Amino acid sequence: MVAVLAFLCITFGFLSPLLDGKEILGDDTRHFLGMTKEISDYNATHDDAALWTDSMFGGMPAYQINMDQPTNVLTYFDRVLRLLPNASYRVFLYLIGFYLLLLAFGLNPWLSIAGAIAFAFGSYNLIIIVAGHNTKAVAIAYMAPVIGSI
């Protein structure tokens, strides 16, 4: 619990403008919204899901850019984490995921907290959030606990 509380304090301390209602909207996130509009419009008016879109690269399977996966077990965990403001959810996921990895490797909990902070605030991890590479950030965040579970 100490680690989780520390991670929440660190996350919101670093991203305090999010608490004022500001948002990090990366360029790729804006492009994503435009590219998936056709899929979203179709899914809103039809019972089946759109599996293809012509709004990206002259045609692309929808599962590569925007498709719900309701049977994925991580969907429930992800919904809880998404209660946090936009970018803070990804930074918190970096912290908690790497903390779990270091614990799985047998490190002292205090060293695991320090290692998680070092990982989460590595420059590339923050750059991809600012650029709007949201799915890449989440994939990197989940990489650590997956390796730890192995």
Image (spheres, rainbow, N blue to C red):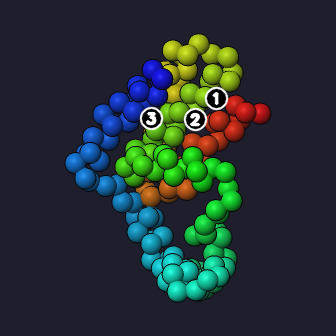
Cα distance between the residues tagged 3 and 1: 16 Å
- Mark 3 lies on a secondary structure that is loop
Kind of residue at disc 3: Phe
Kind of residue at disc 1: Leu
Q: Nearer the viewer, mark 3 or mark 2?
A: 2
**Whole-percent x and y of residue 13?**
30, 34
- Mark 1 lies on a secondary structure that is helix
Residue most toward the left?
A: 20
Residue most toward the front?
A: 47
Cα distance between the residues tagged 1 and 2: 6 Å
Quarter occupied by residue 51 = bottom right
* Residue named by callout 3: 121
* Residue named by callout 2: 97
**Whole-percent x and y of residue 91?**
45, 41
* Residue named by callout 1: 101
Identify which residue, 28 or 46, lies in the foreground.
46
Q: Residue at x 39, y 60 (%)?
A: 26
Q: Nearer the viewer, mark 3 or mark 1?
A: 1
* Label located before the other in sequence (3 or 2): 2
Judge left or right: residue 44 versus residue 59.
left
Cα distance between the residues tagged 3 and 2: 13 Å
